[in-house]
Amino acid sequence: MNTMVIDYLDTSKRWKPELTALRTIVIDCGLEEEFKWRTPCYTFQNSNIILLGSFKEFCTLSFFKGTLLKDKANILVAPGPNSRSVKMATFTNKKGIEVLQTTLKEYIYEALEIEKSGQKVNFKEDQKLNFPEELEAKFNENLDFKNAFNNLTPGRQRGYVLHFSRAKQSKTRISRIEKYQERLFHGKGFHDCVCGLSKKMPSCDGSHNK
């Protein structure tokens, strides 16, 4: 058992009974307990399998490769419209967890077998990105910028396109493209650390705020 997880639960201001119940279920399935991204994480041979999460309206049991699960009980949902791999079960009371205990263990064992088999989520089906016209214009205007973008990993490209596209107004999309131009030229993704202080490289962990 991980002492950081114990401290996390002891100081939790919401969903403590529910998170404790979920933790017991996961540990019973033999996964390794760690503490990552400021939340309990459960792994198999250093591969992330499950996260526990606490939100204002519910707590969650999230599967990193949730889209590969059969979900026979139809209890899993995507955390957001752009999620391509993770799926989670949400809970608002301990009773709901107890009722689904057997089902949750079946899902966890299934996730474990998926990891052991080496299965991976196929991202190729949605790799095609729809660039906003402002980004296309920037590519035509600056070939170096276009080349820098094309040299990014597919995940980093997707992150930028989603961020630029979410802006409702054209002037905001242009502003966002200009804001992240230097970061992009340095091969950094939208969520990558640029200050060098992060303890979770290459991702930003908010250390720059301190």
Image: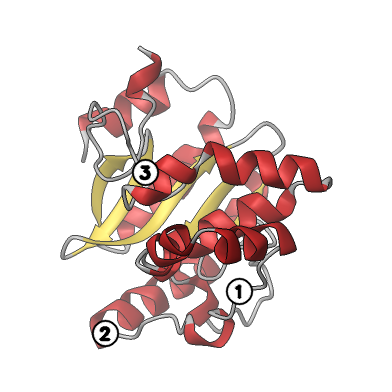
Type of amino acid at the residue the image marks with label 3: Asp
Please name the residue that numbered disc 3 is placed on.
192
Q: Nearer the viewer, residue 153 or 67?
A: 153
User: For residue 73, what is the image quadrant?
Assistant: bottom right
Type of amino acid at the residue the image marks with label 2: Gly
Q: Position of residue 42 (x, y in %)?
A: 31, 54
Q: Position of residue 4 (x, y in %)?
A: 26, 29
Sequence order check, earlier mark of 3 and 2: 2
Q: Nearer the viewer, residue 25 or 145?
A: 145
Q: CA distance from mark 1 to mark 3?
A: 20 Å
Residue for point 38% across, 60% down: 148
Q: Is residue 49 visible?
A: yes
CB under 8 Å between discs 3 and 2 = no
Please name the residue that numbered disc 1 is placed on.
129
Q: CA distance from mark 1 to mark 2?
A: 27 Å
* Local SS, label 2: loop
Please name the residue that numbered disc 2 is placed on.
118
Which colour scheme appears in the figure? secondary structure
Type of amino acid at the residue the image marks with label 1: Leu
Q: Nearer the viewer, residue 140 or 190?
A: 140
Q: CA distance from mark 3 to mark 2?
A: 27 Å
Sequence order check, earlier mark of 1 and 3: 1
